[in-house]
């Protein structure tokens, strides 16, 4: 039990800006990799905060303005951690380059390119428009999109190897994601999806799994595996996909 609590705290500190306490010793890579089992549980905490924030905002303003405020809360809770991965992925894969080394070089560049800027703009516009619908019609279903977005990371790390030969932060997760991490993360995601959104939650889970397979195929074909940026892209775009499904079914 204490190991699971420590892993959850590590996942919380890694994925969010929320306080998770201090750690007295350096965390081994295997321990950090195994925190993936609890990524969806961190997403559940984020989702509950977003749900109660939405209910509070609706007391004073419209669903459209509440959606914008909710995006700000989401950004503050996560520090925009995975947005960078989305932008870097768009810059690298849409650069017109075919050599893996050149794509990796673009993705590692700290500067934001035009494709990355467009991707960020379109993602935030899509999230805003879908949140505007969901907040007004089915606010309780808001809880599940951060959960499933983080499950997308686990699905990819379980089924892929790390693409960069020199390694990186993402390699810790691809090297240490076993069946236990996938099953725990999947069980939490499916249970909470059904609890908070019923049949719509099931549709979201199925849609996300299928989407994860598409990302896996594309990443293997273009890069030979995944990188930390690809994992960030999967989380952010996975959240957007879930929001689209929820908005369409509301």
Image (tube, rainbow, N blue to C red):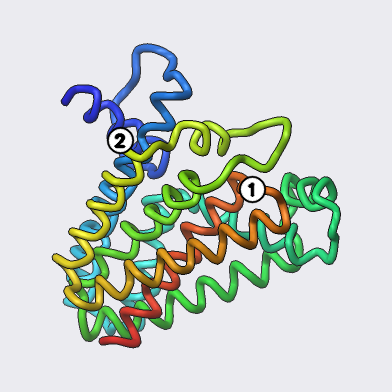
| Mark before the other along the chain sequence, 2 or 1 | 2
Q: Which mark is residue 242?
A: none
Who's the residue at 37% across and 51% down the image?
A: 77
Which of the 4 quarters of the picture holds residue 64? bottom left
Who's the residue at 42% across and 29% down the image?
A: 32
Where does label 1 land, which residue? 225
Identify the element where label 1 is drawn: loop
Residue 176 horizontal/vertical position (percent): 46, 32
Residue 98 horizontal/vertical position (percent): 84, 59
Q: Answer yes or no: do the residues labelled 2 and 1 have beta carbons within 8 Å?
A: no
Q: Tell me if residue 101 comes above or below residue 4 in the rendering.
A: below
Furthest residue in direction top, as rendered: 25
* Badge 1: residue crowd in 10 Å (few <14, some 14–19, many ≥20): many
Residue 169 horizontal/vertical position (percent): 57, 34
58 vs 105, left or right, is left
Disc 2 to disc 1, C-alpha distance: 33 Å
* Badge 2: residue crowd in 10 Å (few <14, some 14–19, many ≥20): few
Who's the residue at 66% across and 32% down the image?
A: 167
114 vs 9, left or right, is right
Q: Relative to the observer, which residue lies in front, 132 or 140?
A: 140
Q: Tell me if residue 19 comes above or below residue 217 in the rendering.
A: above
Where does label 2 land, which residue? 19
Identify the element where label 2 is drawn: loop
Q: Relative to the observer, which residue lies in front, 47 or 226?
A: 226
Who's the residue at 35% across and 34% down the image?
A: 35
């Amino acid at each position: 039990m204490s190991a699971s609590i420590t892993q959850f705290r590590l996942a919380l500190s890694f994925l969010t800006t929320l306080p998770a306490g201090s750690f007295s010793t350096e965390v081994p890579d295997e321990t950090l990799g195994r925190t993936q089992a609890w990524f969806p549980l961190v997403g559940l905490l984020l989702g509950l905060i977003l749900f109660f924030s939405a209910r509070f905002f609706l007391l004073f303003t419209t669903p459209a303005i509440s959606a914008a405020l909710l995006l700000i809360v989401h950004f503050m809770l996560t520090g925009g951690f995975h947005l960078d991965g989305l932008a870097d992925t768009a810059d690298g894969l849409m650069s017109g380059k075919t050599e893996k080394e050149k794509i990796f070089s673009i993705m590692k560049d700290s500067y934001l390119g035009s494709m990355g800027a467009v991707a960020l703009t379109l993602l935030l516009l899509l999230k805003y428009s879908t949140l505007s619908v969901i907040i007004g019609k089915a606010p309780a279903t808001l809880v599940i999109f951060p959960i499933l977005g983080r499950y997308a990371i686990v699905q990819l790390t379980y089924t892929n190897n790390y693409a960069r030969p020199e390694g990186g932060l993402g390699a810790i997760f691809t090297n240490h994601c076993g069946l236990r991490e996938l099953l725990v993360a999947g069980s939490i995601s499916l249970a909470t999806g059904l609890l908070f959104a019923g049949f719509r939650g099931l549709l979201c889970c199925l849609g996300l799994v299928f989407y994860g397979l598409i990302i896996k195929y594309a990443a293997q074909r273009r890069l030979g595996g995944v990188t930390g940026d690809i994992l960030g892209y999967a989380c952010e775009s996975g959240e957007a996909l879930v929001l689209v499904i929820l908005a369409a079914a509301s």
